[in-house]
Image (spheres, rainbow, N blue to C red):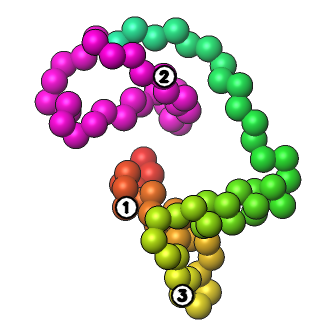
Amino acid sequence: MSTITAFLKPDAEGFLRVPVPAELRNQEFRVEATPSVAETKAPDSTEDRAEAVREWARHARGSVRLQPGETEDDVRMAYYRQKYGPLP
């Protein structure tokens, strides 16, 4: 049995949803959890957030080519929407 550590945000209904790899989705799980507040640092300002987006774009796999009027944030969100599906 392996142990994972996950930082999860509750959804609008207050539930925590745990991502499960595709190859394990047809199995039953026993989950033990110890809730605690995660110590994360949110961006301090709009400039910090903009720098985080630029950093993501620099490390994105392949080359990122923006269409006219498209921002780096648009590309990043499209990537995650394709990977994880639309927001609930």
Rendered position, 17 above or below 35:
below
- Magenta segment's dominant SS is loop
Q: Nearer the viewer, residue 17 or 39?
A: 39
As shown in the figure, which amino acid type bears the numbered disc 2?
Answer: Thr
Q: Amino acid at mark 3?
A: Gln
> Residue type at mark 1?
Gln
Q: Which residue is mark 3?
A: 67
Q: Which numbered disc flags the more N-terminal residue, 2 or 1?
A: 2
Q: In the current view of this chain or complex, which residue is farthest to the left?
A: 26
Residue 67, x across and y down, in percent: 54, 87
Nearer to us: label 2 or label 3: 2
Q: Image point 19% across, 19% down: which residue?
A: 28
The stretch in magenta equals: 1-30
Quadrant of residue 7 in the image?
top right
- Taking the spot 22% from the left edge, 40% from the top edge, the residue there is 22
| In magenta stretch: residue 17 | yes
Residue 10 visible: no
Mark 3 or mark 1, earlier in chain:
3
Count of numbered circles in the view: 3
Q: Residue 35: within the magenta?
A: no
Residue underneath mark 1: 82
- Estimate the spatial distance between the alpha carbons at disc 2 and disc 1, rounded to whole Å: 24 Å
Residue 44 location, x and y as percent?
84, 47
How far across and how far down the image is residue 21, in percent?
Answer: 28, 36
Question: From the viewer's perspective, is 47 left or right of 54?
Answer: right
